[in-house]
Amino acid sequence: MRRASFQIKHHRWRRKLFAALMLVFCIAMILLVDSQYSKIKMLALISPPSHKPKIAFLFIARNRLPLDLVWDVFFQGDSENRFSVYVHSRPGFLFNAATTRSAFFFNRQINGSIQVDWGEATMIQAERLLLQKALMDPFNERFLFLSDSCIPLYNFSYTYDYITSTSTSFVDSFSDTKESRYNPRMDPVIPVSSWRKGSQWVVLTRRHAEIVVEDETVFPVFKLHCKKRALPEFWRGKPFPIDPSKQHNCIPDEHYVQTLLALKGLEDEITRRSVTHSSWDISSSRDPERRGWHPVTYKLADATPKLIQSIMGIDNIYYETEYRREWCTNKGEPSKCFLFARKFTRPAALWLLNTSALSIRQ
């Protein structure tokens, strides 16, 4: 009996010891899991999930985008969420199934858009509004301005690699020494030594985009003193200028970004050329007052594979005012200069798309 009682007590003791060991083990496992979870949570805060930098495509349009189908094919070439789209159109215009045939543009109009007039500071204001909206996405690292008449020349992957392979902005910028666009009233905020000219179709890094949006010094001076010279048909009802040739013919969007970055001492952070091709033919207008005001518009009869090949074949740009020839490079190697081209009408662009003259399909 005593031996049986001893065995029962011994088994009870062993069960209690096992239960205690299991309890200690469970507590240890809970503490370990909690510790590992805390480490994972901390690492997530320190190192957020990897995400490829995006290019923000910033379209400036009058109303709808007539070349939306061309861009639809281009954007279909990305499957990794490497781009975003923003459109500045006239106030109240909406991009939906009734106004565009590309879902990439649905509801991509920005709020608070303004009426934009060519050759006025409102164009700069529209650019700043687009940048302000696009900067809200922390993954947008490049900011590319495009007009409603621009077409892509290459597929998305080539374009993305070309733009993101360099740490610089692409800003067509040169010293403006031959034209009388500089207004001395801009001094001393904008000295003539920092006065620059170039195409408004720039590609900005995030740092440079933030500088443009945060600018509260240069932009007000442009609004006051950088104004285009009125054409003769607009003189009616106004005092006739004594000598129209002596008026300052300042087109704000062709000077603002270039001059702002020069004033900030950032010209070593830019590639001083555009990636968007425009053809300036000063003989295209019979009216001498209008020559050189707008680039050539390519219509259906002009849209040939030979035209596209000639644009895609350009590998250098000559800047006459600086006696500078810019040889185009990418990743340290010689390359073609242009990724986009303008100005194309809708029939011309669609014909090029249907004939596969453009290399935009993956």
Image (cartoon, grey):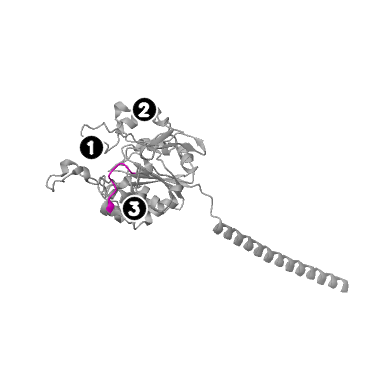
Q: Are marks 1 and 2 in contact (CB under 8 Å)?
A: no
| Residue density around tag 1, few if under 14, some if 14–19, many if 20 or more, within 10 Å | few
Q: Point out the stretch of residues depicted in magenta.
A: 176-184
Q: Comparing marks 1 and 2, which lies closer to the viewer? A: 1
Q: Is residue 356 visible?
A: no
What's the mark number on residue 151?
none
Q: CA distance from mark 3 to mark 1?
A: 29 Å
Q: Secondary structure at mark 1?
A: loop
Q: Are marks 3 and 2 in contact (CB under 8 Å)?
A: no
Place residue 2 in its image quadrant: bottom right
What's the residue at 65%, 65% (across, down)? Answer: 31
Q: Comparing marks 3 and 2, which lies closer to the viewer? A: 3
Q: CA distance from mark 1 to mark 2?
A: 25 Å
| Residue density around tag 3, few if under 14, some if 14–19, many if 20 or more, within 10 Å | some
Q: Is residue 203 visible?
A: yes
What's the residue at 36%, 37% (across, down)? Answer: 320
Q: Amino acid at mark 3?
A: Pro
Q: Amino acid at mark 2?
A: Leu
Q: Which residue is mark 1?
A: 290
**Residue 185: x %, y % from top left:** 27, 54
Count of numbered tags? 3
Q: Nearer the viewer, residue 3 or 198?
A: 198
| Residue density around tag 2, few if under 14, some if 14–19, many if 20 or more, within 10 Å | few
The rendered magenta stretch, by its main secondary structure, is classed as: loop
Q: Secondary structure at mark 2?
A: helix
Q: Comparing marks 3 and 1, which lies closer to the viewer? A: 3
- First in sequence, mark 3 or 2: give its number: 3
Q: Which residue is mark 3?
A: 191
What's the mark number on residue 307?
2
Place residue 326 in its image quadrant: top left
Q: Residue furthest bottom?
A: 2
- As for residue 181 lying within the magenta part, the answer is yes
